[in-house]
Image (spheres, rainbow, N blue to C red):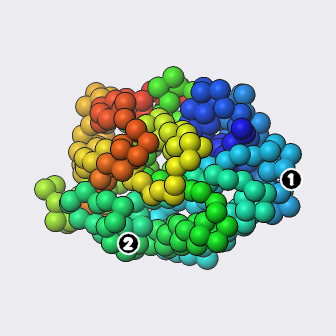
Amino acid sequence: MPVLVTGGAGYIGSQTVLELTDAGETVVVLDDLSTGFEAAVSSPAKLVVGDVGNPTLLASVIAEYEIDAIIHFAGSIVVPESIVNPLGYYHNNTCKTRTLIESAVMGHVPHFIFSSTAAVYGAAGFEPVNENSPLRPQSPYGRSKLMSEWMLEDISNAHGLKYTVLRYFNVAGADPGGRTGQATKGATHLIKVASEAALGKRKFIEVFGTDYPTPDGTCIRDYIHVKDLALAHKLALTRLRGGGQNLTANCGYSRGYSVLEILNAVQRVNGTKLDIRFSNRRPGDPLAIVADSSVARSEFGWTPQFDNLDAIVSSALNWERAPLY
């Protein structure tokens, strides 16, 4: 039962492809390689280079490989960038997702897993958010993802497509086996950027905002290891194939760390000091957001294996020391 993974040459997508191929799944990756890497795609998987917004290509791939399920990662993900380029984000994240969902319906693909985000909650505060918490995205990025969630719900009601939406929090770390990791140039993920700075690949690390009403004045986020997130996708797929109904689930560890706590962890694990510089707040950055992940744990038996900040940081540093691509 082949699985189509869009954006499977990217950071999270490539880790999920590894998770699936390690489990014996047949995987087809569709990626335009604008931010992904051919070398990131696990060798048992088939790579098709192309645009997820191309309906002709999608129809051909779905028919040729008899796709049973789609896991959709392809899209744009930088909050500040979305504020200055909202049209680009609505095009990449919403319009192209609509094309993909339509292709799934036309191709009779029964299962769809959508890569969503905690940004749909907006400024949530210190208490963990659950899937029924108010949806108040503060950026075009968050809104573009929420629109796609709404489309999935409506199209499922009309056409019977079964789906799972995974809203994940701040993804970090690298494959424990060193096979894939975050390699995007100019990446904005905090642990990635801090790891680069710790190893001399960046001259300094910039902290945006020190006047938030938190214990140390910096934003608080829930960080999840990329391998645990990949496992969640595999388990969600198993649940759908077993007859599971539509589901939206948070993926996080239910524990928040401030920006300065993360930087201290990178310094501690690497044994070096960072050049930390402080700047003003960035537009669209919420104060704090932490996951209530009880739905994922109860509905498809997700049990994280890497819920440890130092382990996350260590894997990120190891990747930066010897990246494969």
**Nearer to us in this view, 138 or 162:** 162
Which quadrant of the rendered structure holds the N terminus?
top right
Amino acid at pointer 2: Leu
Q: Is residue 210 visible?
A: no
The residue sitting at 60% across, 66% down in the picture is 156
Q: Earlier in the sequence, mark 1 or mark 2?
A: 1
Q: Residue furthest left?
A: 215
Q: Position of residue 127 (x, y in %)?
A: 21, 59
**Rendered view: 48 above or below 80:** above
**Nearer to us in this view, 51 or 251:** 251
Residue 26: numbered disc: none
The residue sitting at 64% across, 63% down in the picture is 160
Q: Which residue is mark 2?
A: 135
Mark 2 lies on a secondary structure that is loop
**Rendered view: 176 above or below 248:** above
Q: Residue furthest top?
A: 177
Q: Position of residue 293 (x, y in %)?
A: 33, 49
Q: Position of residue 38 (x, y in %)?
A: 72, 38
Mark 1 lies on a secondary structure that is helix
Residue 60: numbered disc: 1
| 290 on left or right of 68 | left
| 29 on left or right of 255 | right
**Rendered view: 221 above or below 305:** below
**Nearer to us in this view, 215 or 208:** 215
Which quadrant of the rendered structure holds the C terminus?
top right
Amino acid at pointer 1: Ser
Q: Residues within 10 Å of mark 2 (few under 14, many from 20)?
A: some
| 49 on left or right of 273 | right
The residue sitting at 68% across, 63% down in the picture is 101
The residue sitting at 61% across, 76% down in the picture is 87
